[in-house]
Image (spheres, rainbow, N blue to C red):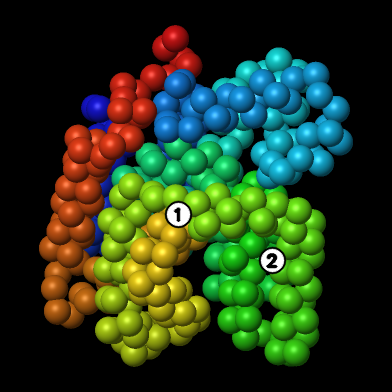
Amino acid sequence: MLAYWFMYLLPGFMAIALSHRHRIQSFRSMGWFWLIFVLFIGLRFEVGGDWGNYLRYYEMAYGEPLASLLSGRGDPGYVFLNWIAANNDWGMGFVNLVCAVIFMTGLISFSSKQPAPWLALTVAVPYLVIVVSMGYTRQGVALGLIFLALNWLEKRNLFWFLFYIVVAALFHKSAMLMVPLGFFITRGNWLFRGFVVISIAYGLWGLIVSDSYEAIWANYVDAEMKSQGALIRIVMNLAPALVLLLFRRQWLRVFPDGRFWIWMAFGAVAAVFLVSFASTAVDRVSLYLTPLQVVVLSRMPYLFRNRVTPQATTTVLVLGYAAVLFVWLNYATHAPHWLPYRNLLFQ
């Protein structure tokens, strides 16, 4: 358990110590943090609720023709990565390490562009880092790539935004739900943008979703799967969404290129009303709304600096997410799958 507190307190301490300075950090200046977390996430051993399922991915890939594996219902990017590792005897650790590199590169690249980058990382640790990247490996990779895509969305670059979304969808099909955000890129002809976005969405559906959507719908909706803790995680998205919607005029004055965040906030509000319909499906989709927590909460000290000191806002947020981590580690149903933390370096 102490290992997870180390993961949290490291950026948390930096966030409070540097709360009086609000400036974008370079990726290189945060490289040491990237390395520590890549090793921590990527070299974990028998940690995470789906460890057994991912181990089967690796074992099934050994000695099998790649074409046979890709013709199945698995996510092609993750299947291909396992096929390479298994048939070269590199071990599951190699797969997890590559996934950790992708996730942390996306997270730090995105966080480093926020006014309070260390606070952005702190907010991400309890759920995105510990639960998602160490438990839902495929979605963790997809989320890391989505962070990279969001960087390009804010730069209004449609090509690179869609490129990273397409790659993310190769690791988890649900990432294609982010394609419509391309409509919010204001550069270029809107008709052309619409054609490209719709074409990409249609292409992804045909290539990687159409053969399995019935099974996905049956598993997540018709079977009425219930995801424990789904409502809590959705409410965690709701809080920053409400902050953004209540102060959207002030937000747009300071961050004029972030209009699409407002639409994501509406999505987070809608999720609250949909969770009773199919909690697991809504929970999985809401994962891609969690960047709201990172971007809104890391901008709050700067946004409200004339009302509350940045140090006070930062301290409250760090303590609040520390409480989230404490409750999850001690009371979450599936937390024992993460405890104790084990690393391949010490096996």
Q: Is residue 23 left or right of residue 104?
A: left
Q: Are marks 2 and 1 in contact (CB under 8 Å)?
A: no
Q: How many marks?
A: 2
Q: Amino acid at mark 2?
A: Leu
Q: Is residue 192 left or right of residue 184?
A: right
Q: Residue 162 got which mark? A: 2
Residue 311 appears in the rendering: no
Residue in view at x 25 percent, y 27 percent: 1
Tag 1's secondary structure?
A: loop
Residue in view at x 42 percent, y 12 percent: 346
Residue 275 percent coordinates (x, y): 38, 64
Q: Work out how far the residue at label 2 is from the one at label 1, CA to CA, in angstroms.
A: 32 Å
Q: Is residue 15 above or below residue 64?
A: below
Q: Residue 224 got which mark? A: 1
> Which callout, 2 or 1, points to the residue nearer the camera?
1
Q: Residues within 10 Å of mark 1 (few under 14, many from 20)?
A: some
Q: Nearer the viewer, residue 38 or 165?
A: 165
The image quarter in which residue 79 lies: top right
Residue 112 percent coordinates (x, y): 44, 57
Residue in view at x 61 percent, y 34 percent: 98
Which comes sooner in the sequence, label 2 or label 1?
Answer: 2
The image quarter in which residue 90 lies: top right
Q: Nearer the viewer, residue 280 or 252?
A: 280
Residue in view at x 69 percent, y 66 percent: 162
Residue 342 appears in the rendering: yes
Q: Nearer the viewer, residue 186 or 113?
A: 186
Residue 206 percent coordinates (x, y): 79, 61
Q: Is residue 131 above or below residue 147?
A: above
Q: Is residue 238 above or below residue 166?
A: below
